[in-house]
Image (tube, rainbow, N blue to C red):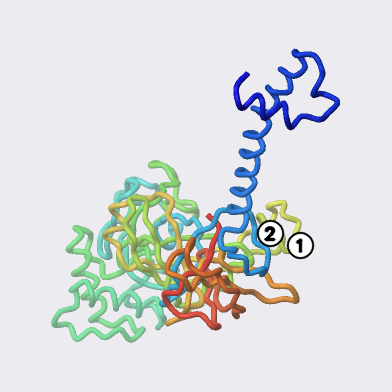
Amino acid sequence: MNRTAESAESEAPAGEEHGPGRGRGRRRKHGRIVVPVLVVAMAAGAAAVAVARPWDRDHGTAKQSAVPYDLVPVEQGSLSSSIQLTGALAYDAPTPVVASGKGTLTGLPVVGAVVRAGETLYEVDGQPVVLMTGDRPLWRDLGPDVSEGPDVEQLERNLVKLGHAKGLALTADRKFTPATAAAVKRWQRSLGLLESGTVPLGGVAMLPQESARVQQVSAQIGAAVSGSSVVTVTRTDLVVTAQPAENQISRFKPDGRARVKLADGTVVEGRIRSLVRGSAGGGDDKSGGSGDGSGAKTTVTIALDGQEQAQRAGLYAVTVSVVGDTADNALVVPVTALLALDGGGYGVRVADGSDRSDGPAPRLVRVQLGLIADAKAQITGDVRPGARVVIPK
C-alpha cells in the first residue's frame, strides 16, 4: 500500500476502517476523483461570475447583465433624421392629345419619338398636324375674319418663335392682322402646304411644352377623327414619383430637397415639386382607414437635377431619401448604449479607465436625449467627446 492510500484510509470514518478490503478499495477510488471535480466546478463558477459582471471590482454597485459588452467612443458631429421609401422613374406629365376637326388618320408617330414645336405630331387626310406651344387647344379656324381671342395670340406667339414673322412687325396681340396672315402663309410654305393664310381647326396640336415624347399611341391609321385621344405624350424630363405612408407625408415640404439613388447606384439631388393627397382609407393606411385599397394613395413628384444620369440609369425603381431634423455639433452614441433608469429617463455607462478589463468600473451617467436617427442618439450630460460608453456586443 502506498502513502496516498494510507492517508485515505486513516481519514476514513471509524465504521469503515475495519471493513473488507474491497470496500476500502472503492473508498480510495472515490478519494481520487471527487477532489478534482470540485476544483473544476469552482473554477467554472468563478468564470461565470466574471462574464456576468465584467467590470465589477468589488464595488458593490448596480448589477450588470450577463451579455458580452464592448466600448465605443462618444462622437461629436452632425446627426440627421431621414426617411427612405421606394419610388419610380417616369417621364413627366402624361397628357392625352385629342384630335379635333374631321378627317381620317393617315399618319401616327412611334412610341418613344420626340416631337418638337413646329414639327408634325400626326397626320389627318395626308396633312400634318403640327405641334405648337400653348395652354389651351384651338377651337375654331383662324383666319383674317376671326374675332380677337387668346387662341389668336397663341398662334402669333408661335409664329414669331418659329421664325416666320421676321420683318413683318407682327405682335402677339390677340388680333388676326394682315401681318398674322402673312406669317401663316410663310409657315404653310415651309410645310409644303397650300398658302391659304388660314389655319384650319385640327391643323395644330397645342401643348404646354416645347418638346413632347410619345408615350402611347391609342388610335389606328385609317380611323376617323372622332374627338378621342390619338396619342399620349409626356415631357422629355424624368421625374420620380413615390407614395409615402400617412406618417411620412409631413417630411415632404414644398420645394424641399430629396436625394434619389438610381438603379445603377448613382445618387442625384431632387426638388419636391408637388404632393397630391389621396383619399382616406386607401392602400395600407394604418391610421384607422379601411385599408382595402379602395382609395388613392398620396403621390409625391420629385423633379431631378441630374437628367443625364437618370436617363442612363433607365426606368427602374429608385430609393428616395428625405432629410428631416438635423442636430449640429451634437454628442452622439449608439442607441444600444442607452439604459432606462428607475423613475424615468436614460443613462449611459462611461468607462473612465484605459482598458475595459483593467480600469475602474464604468460609472452610470444620466443623460438627456435629443434627436434619434439611424440607430444613433444625441445626448447631453456629464459626457465628453471621445469618452467610451458600454454597449452590448
Quarter of the image for residue 30 reads: top right
Q: Residue at x 55, y 76 (%)?
A: 371
376 to 253, vertically: above or below:
above
| Residue 101, position as x, y percentages in the image | 43, 58
Looking at the rendering, which quadrant does residue 134 occupy?
Answer: bottom left
User: Mark 1 = which residue?
Assistant: 288
Q: Which residue is mark 2?
A: 285
Looking at the image, the residue that sits furthest to the left is 167
For label 2, the crowd category at 10 Å Cα-Cα, with few meaning under 14, some 14 to 19 and many 20 or more, is: some
Image quarter (top left, top right, bottom left or bottom right) of the N terminus: top right
Question: CA separation, marks 1 and 2?
Answer: 7 Å
The number of callouts visible is 2
Q: Vertically, is 285 above or below 141?
A: above
Q: Quadrant of residue 311?
A: bottom left
Is residue 193 found left or right of 248 in the rendered image?
Answer: left
Identify residue type, mark 2: Asp
Q: Residues within 10 Å of mark 1 (few under 14, many from 20)?
A: few
Query: What residue is at 26 percent from the left and 86 percent from the top?
Result: 171
Q: Is residue 273 visible?
A: no
Is label 2 in a helix, a strand or a loop? loop
Q: Give coordinates of residue 348: x percent, y percent.
A: 58, 72
Q: Compare residues 61 and 30 and report the one nearer the observer.
A: 30
Q: Is residue 2 visible?
A: yes
Mark 1: amino acid: Gly
* x and y, in percent, of residue 255 in the image: 45, 77
Please, what secondary structure does the residue beneath circle 1 have?
Answer: loop
Question: Circles 1 and 2: CB distance less than 8 Å?
Answer: yes
Q: Is residue 118 left or right of residue 295?
A: left
Residue 157 or 322: which is nearer the viewer?
A: 322
Query: 178 or 20: nearer the eye?
Result: 20
